[in-house]
Structures are given as C-alpha cells and as structure tokens.
C-alpha cells in the first residue's frame, strides 16, 4: 500500500483542496492519504475559521483517509517551524511514501535548488542576507533577494506563498533525512490571496470573506457539497466563524499583566519588539490597532500577528527551541479517519515512532513529560479558541477531551 502525505490547514476545505488530493493521488499512485492539519490556530497567527473537527470531517469526506493534528506550538509558528513539525509527524508515522504540496508553478527542481542553497548557506549568502536585513527588508524578502544574487533563481518565485512553505518542507526532508519523495502540485484557479468568488477554484481567503460579507450561497458554491452541509450546520449552531478580532479583551488582559521581560521570552520576539508591543496598549485596544502600531517594513503584519497569538497562548521561545531539537515528536494525535479504511489506524499504531493518541483521556498512561507538556499547550489553545465562538453555549472548556474523533 502506497501512502501519500499532505501538510495543510483546510481553512476551510474547498474545491481546490479536493483537486489537489485527487491530482496528488494520480501523480503518486498512492492508495491512501494522511494529512497533517493545523488545529485551532493557523500559521498566519489567527484562529481557524471553523473548528478542527469540522475541518477534519470535511477533508475525510473528500479524499483524505486520516487527519493528524499539528500541535499549536508548530501550527501557529513561522514557516520553518511549521514545516519542521509537520514533516516530522509524517516521518514519525513510519508510513509515508510521498509528500505532496502545492506550488504556484509546479517546478520542483527550482524549489529543490533553492532549498539546497538555504540548507547549506555560503558566506556570500549570509553576508547578503545580513545586508538586506540591515536595509530594513523583511526576512522573506531579504532571503529571496539574496538567493537571486547567488543563483539563477528568480526572487519572484521565492516570494510566492506556497513556495515559501514548499522550500521549508524540502529543507525539513533533508534535515531529518526523510525517505519521503516530494512532488509539487501546481495550484489551479485563483491566487492564494484572491478575494474573488468567481471562477472554478476560489481561494480560502475569498470563501472566508464571502461568508463574513453575507455572500454565504456564493461562498459555499466553492466547496464540495458535503463540506457545504457541514459548514452550514456549524454556522447555524454558532460554533463558527471564530474571528481574531474577538480576542481583544483576552489579549489586552495578557499585555497589561506582562512586563517587557515576560514578553521577551515569547516565541519570535526579537530586537526590542517587546517595548514596541507594550507601548501599543497606551493608545490601542483593538487587535487591528495594535497590529498597525507594531508592524513595520522590517516586521510584517503576519509576524506581529503570530507574536500576539504566542502572547495570548503563552508560547515561549525556549519551549519551541526545546521541541525543535527533539529526535521524535512526543505524540501523534489522530483527529479523524474514514471507517472504510479503519485498518489505517492499526497500521499507524504498529509503525509509528511516537505514541499514537486517539483518546486524550488515556494520555497520562502513554505520554512522557514532554508529551504531556505539549498536550497541555494544545488543551489551552483549544480552550482559548472556544472563547470566541459566536454562541456562548459552545464556549465550554476541555473540548479536546470531550469532542470525539471525526469518523466518516
């Protein structure tokens, strides 16, 4: 049996994602698909629009056979940390033959060349990178410009959203000496950040915006029929949408009770950003206002947004550094699977290099101290996530322990 691995967020799952799974299976000849998916919060430093069980079920109904959770420590991090965590989970399953990822142009060889250069930095590259950073460029822009100078790679290619993650996947495959074979699937339809609901494959951005702007019918045309029914249900119940702006009270509480030294310990806070963040609350309250105050040419909005989320969730630099250095992931958590491929769960349990979690109530019996710490961060993230659900009836705690796996 050949198994395909995909790293994703499905925020939300849409027709483009369904196409990608189908194309990747065709290209790879895979019999089954295991996806590693962000949980309650996503890589841009925002809450997921729909909860993780709903997103997992949508994917299982449309081509995926099993969904594994990417712990929030990695899911809400920069591209390198996100990719490293996800690739390690797939590698630790002991089952993945092929890793498929999206690409704006499908040119795997160019991405592999860039990844090799980034993994084996020359003195010239490091000097150029430092120069461009000193000029005030953001890290992604400085990196792309430096690579363009030392190679024949066009920096415009490296600045594409899918390519930035693809480079990190390829770097992680080399770093962990993975046996997975990478394949790049060319993105079809609207660009990553497009807000248009026209055409065959609208972006997740457009679908989320359409729902928020009372264009629900038009937005749901862009998702598979089974996913549309799921999304309509949770929207009517009031468990979605979960929006970043609704955490203003919680974030302000955290910021008003933290010192500059406290913030300096938070993941991704560098070069005095803690002082700028603290100054922001003298005149700002809403999250959008804080973001506008803190961001600069050097520090992108997305980076600042992630930092604010790390503050909210109390994710520290030392924790991320510690878990990044571990040889294996402390656990592999199954969010859901298909009943008609239930043997996959048994195969995973037999082949995994890490403990497999299906029932979190049993975690103390199977996890070591590291695993329990990582799981405690996950529980905290899910509890914080539920605070912003529109319907107060669904804001209860401990949902990681009470909501069952998504089984279809």
Image: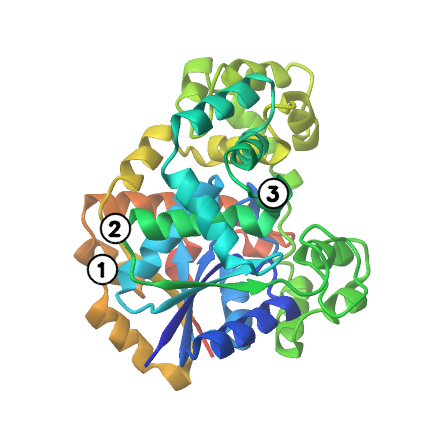
- Image x and y of residue 303, in percent: 56, 33
Which image quarter: residue 70?
bottom left
Q: Which mark is residue 242?
A: none
Q: How many marks?
A: 3
Residue placed under numbered mark 2 in the picture: 330
Asked if disc 1 and disc 2 are in contact, CB closer than 8 Å, the reply is yes
- Image x and y of residue 111, in percent: 50, 51
Residue placed under numbered mark 3 in the picture: 154
Residue at coordinates 73% horizontally, 69% vertically from top-left? 220
What is the secondary structure assignment of the residue under circle 2?
A: loop
Q: Residues within 10 Å of mark 1 (few under 14, many from 20)?
A: many
- Image x and y of residue 297, in percent: 65, 24
User: What is the CA distance from the residue labelled 1 to the residue labelled 3?
Assistant: 42 Å
Q: Earlier in the sequence, mark 1 or mark 3?
A: 3
Q: Is residue 264 above or below residue 153?
A: above
Q: From the viewer's perspective, is 323 left or right of 36? A: left
Instruction: Report if residue 396 is visible in the image.
Output: no
Residue at coordinates 63% horizontally, 57% vertically from top-left? 240
User: What is the CA distance from the residue labelled 1 to the residue labelled 2?
Assistant: 7 Å
Which image quarter: residue 407?
bottom left
Residue placed under numbered mark 1 in the picture: 355
Quadrant into which the N terminus falls: bottom left
Residue at coordinates 38% horizontally, 83% vertically from top-left? 341
């Amino acid at each position: 049996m050949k198994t395909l691995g995909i790293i994703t967020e499905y925020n939300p799952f849409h027709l483009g994602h369904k196409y990608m799974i189908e194309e990747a299976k065709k290209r790879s000849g895979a019999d089954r698909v295991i996806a590693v998916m962000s949980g309650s919060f996503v890589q841009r430093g925002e809450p997921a629009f729909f909860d993780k069980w709903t997103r997992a079920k949508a994917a299982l109904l449309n081509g995926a056979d099993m969904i594994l959770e990417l712990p929030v420590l990695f899911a809400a991090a920069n591209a390198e940390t996100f990719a490293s965590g996800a690739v390690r989970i797939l590698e630790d399953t002991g089952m993945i033959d092929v890793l498929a990822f999206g690409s704006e142009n499908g040119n795997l060889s160019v991405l592999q060349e860039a990844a090799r250069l980034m993994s084996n930095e020359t003195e010239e590259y490091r000097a150029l990178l430092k120069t461009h950073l000193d000029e005030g460029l953001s890290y992604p822009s400085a990196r792309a410009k430096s690579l363009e100078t030392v190679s024949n790679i066009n920096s415009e290619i490296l600045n594409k959203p899918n390519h930035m993650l693809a480079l990190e996947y390829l770097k992680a495959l080399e770093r962990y000496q993975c046996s997975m074979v990478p394949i790049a699937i060319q993105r079809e339809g609207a660009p990553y950040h497009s807000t248009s609901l026209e055409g065959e494959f609208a972006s997740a951005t457009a679908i989320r915006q359409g729902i928020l702007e009372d264009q629900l019918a038009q937005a749901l045309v862009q998702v598979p029929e089974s996913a549309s029914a799921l999304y309509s249900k949770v929207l009517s119940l009031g468990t979605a949408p979960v929006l970043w702006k609704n955490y203003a009270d919680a974030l302000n509480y955290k910021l008003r009770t933290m010192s500059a030294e406290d913030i300096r310990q938070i993941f991704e806070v560098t070069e005095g950003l803690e002082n700028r963040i603290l100054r922001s609350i003298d005149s700002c309250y809403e999250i959008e206002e804080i973001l506008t105050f803190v961001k600069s040419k050097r520090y992108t909005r997305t980076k600042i947004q992630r930092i604010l989320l790390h503050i909210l969730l109390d994710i520290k630099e030392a924790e991320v550094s510690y878990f990044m250095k571990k040889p294996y992931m402390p656990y592999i958590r199954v969010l859901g699977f298909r009943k008609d491929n239930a043997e996959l769960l048994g195969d995973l349990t037999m082949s995994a290099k890490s403990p497999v979690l299906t029932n979190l109530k049993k975690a103390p019996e199977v996890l070591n101290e590291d695993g329990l710490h990582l799981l405690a961060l996950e529980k905290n993230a899910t509890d914080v996530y539920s605070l912003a659900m529109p319907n107060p009836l669904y804001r209860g705690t401990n949902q990681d322990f009470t909501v069952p796996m998504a089984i279809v």
